[in-house]
Image (cartoon, grey):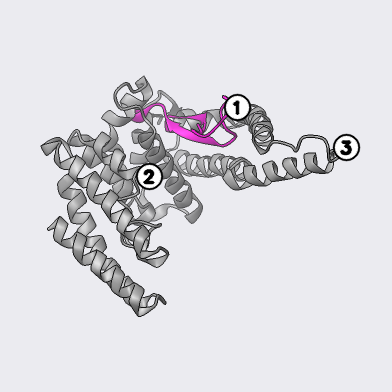
Amino acid sequence: MLFCMGNGEKISSLADFKRESGESLAQLISDLNFHNKHHGPGAKTGKMVGRFLSKMVDRQSPDEPEPDITSAEVDVDLESAREARTVLGEIQGQHGKVLERFGLRLAHQQDASLRAGVPSGPIQMRVANAHALITYLRSLQAGVLSENVKESLQTLVESIERQVAHTHLENPLPEEKGMLENLDSIVDVFKKLKDAVRIQHLEHYALFHRTNRLPQYLETEREGLWQQPEEGFGPADWVKDISPEELEQKWKSALSVLRSQETLGDTGVSKELRDHLLTCIKSARETIKTTSWSEEIKQSFREIMKKYEEELE
């Protein structure tokens, strides 16, 4: 008996298809991770510093102009982009079948700080065919997934999150439009995998897209205000490594973002943001107790927390 998948591919054994597809996805992501490890921010900085120091050593005399660090950065960007183009073609050729099966494509990761005007070295996955992706994910069963496949699916979730975050929402590309229109369905099929993947972030994107407030949510996210306690360095954790003056400025800025959202009425995210910030203040109060700051600084922090809690309530 033949089964027909969403992209028209016919298979004879659904079990073999699921197992082989999961393993193939894991290998694809392994190859991407290997490439990106050597072209991410840390690797780029190391190469840039090495290139700069090499030019310093090669100076013929002290009278020669010192090398420009910006020039070294551009050299590394260009080299990284050239290598990325080659690797992207190789990975597409090697993993073309699984990319099509999952409705994915590969693309250069865009770097806003890039001065050379070329794509950066890291390569990312993007959803190109949401229906094919959903069809495959629906065929999975949470209880029979290997740890390797679970990790690969988590990477896939994070790739979709990055795609949503960097989509030009006012004028999305056709593949982006299709991904956004099917975001609820994508979240639903990931949910059925239970604890195999963490999708809270993607769920938030789907919720605010459904209520036509995704641009406002992303705008606030870029300010670093949605981070949960103990996750990164958001409002709840600012008190861990900051001066009272800097903390005051951060909360003043957060309140300004909230007031801006309030002017948008029902199209803004002020209610959710206010609730989140109040939760962060309560968490910060507990965190202050465990820090090694002097009692004077702790008291300053408490006063700042009290001030902005009153502003928010």
Across and down, in percent, residue 53 comes to 76, 45
For the record, the magenta segment spans 102-131
Across and down, in percent, residue 19 comes to 48, 44
The C terminus lies in quadrant: bottom left
Which numbered marker is on residue 140?
Answer: 2
Q: Amino acid at mark 2?
A: Leu
In three-dimensional space, the C-alpha distance between marks 3 and 2, rounded to whole angstroms, equals: 63 Å
* Image quadrant assignment for residue 70: top right
In three-dimensional space, the C-alpha distance between marks 2 and 1, rounded to whole angstroms, equals: 43 Å
* Image quadrant assignment for residue 139: top left
Residue depth check, mark 3 versus mark 2: number of the one nearer the observer: 3
284 is higher (above) or lower (below) than 225: below
- Count of marks overlaid on the render: 3
Left or right: 106 with respect to 132?
Answer: right
Q: Does the segment drawn in magenta span residue 147? A: no
In three-dimensional space, the C-alpha distance between marks 3 and 1, rounded to whole angstroms, equals: 27 Å
Disc nearer the start of the sequence (2/1): 1
* Residue that badge 1 annotates: 116
Q: Amino acid at mark 1?
A: Ala
Disc nearer the start of the sequence (3/2): 3
287 is higher (above) or lower (below) than 34: below
Judged from the image, the secondary structure of the residue bearing numbered disc 3 is loop
